[in-house]
């Protein structure tokens, strides 16, 4: 089984974003720029996902920037930018699969934390670690 170096680098940058989100509740702009650059390189050299599907993924990801704005940043701007990048990297169908895994895991964690009273409805939790987990599951299942 061949694992392209681009996927490994993208995953490593994603992991660093997740760690920053946990620690600082923000993501460094340079990490997002590096991930966007890897997305563009993947766009140019990996023709497994069509151009149309990549643009559809970018569109779906960018909707989270709108959600961020409409919800007064309940989903952060950095989350929206990262989702836009991941949308372009994965393409539309893999993005939908990825986001379903990520939101399912986030919802499950929130339910558990609410049930054991370690959390209340006003407290926020970082989203990027769940996005990273969804990305890993998506890569593992989808190849």
Image (cartoon, grey):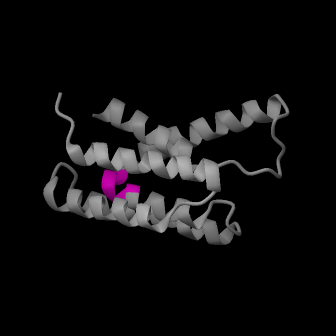
Residue at left offset 36%, top offset 59%: 35
Instruction: Please tell me whether the stretch drawn in magenta is mainly helix, strand or loop.
Output: helix
Q: Quadrant of the N terminus?
A: top left
31 and 91: which is toward the camera? 31
The x, y position of residue 34, in whole percent, is 35, 62
Q: Is residue 63 left or right of residue 50?
A: right
Q: Nearer the viewer, residue 16 or 7?
A: 16
Q: Could you tell me which residue is drawn at 35 percent across and 31 percent down?
A: 140
Compared to residue 119, the image places residue 36 above or below, namely below
Decide whether residue 108 is among the magenta residues. Answer: no
Q: In which quadrant of the rendered image does the C terminus lie? A: top left
Q: Is residue 19 depicted above or below 2 in this figure?
A: below
- The residue sitting at 30% across, 48% down in the picture is 9
Q: Magenta span has 91?
A: yes
Point 71% across, 69% down: residue: 72
**Residue 121 placement, left or right of 98:** right
Q: Which residues are magenta?
A: 86-92
Q: Quadrant of residue 12?
A: top left
């Amino acid at each position: 089984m061949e694992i392209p170096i681009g996927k490994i680098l993208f995953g490593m940058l994603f992991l660093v974003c997740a760690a920053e989100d946990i620690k600082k509740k923000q993501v460094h702009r340079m990490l997002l720029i590096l991930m966007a650059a890897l997305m563009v390189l993947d766009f140019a050299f990996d023709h497994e996902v069509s151009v149309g599907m990549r643009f559809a993924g970018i569109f779906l990801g960018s909707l989270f920037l709108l959600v961020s704005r409409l919800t007064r940043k309940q989903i952060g701007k950095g989350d929206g930018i990262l989702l836009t990048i991941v949308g372009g990297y994965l393409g539309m169908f893999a993005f939908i699969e990825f986001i379903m895994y990520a939101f399912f895991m986030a919802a499950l964690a929130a339910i558990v934390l609410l049930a054991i009273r370690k959390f209340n409805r006003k407290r926020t939790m970082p989203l990027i670690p769940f996005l990273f987990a969804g990305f890993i599951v998506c890569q593992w299942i989808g190849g």
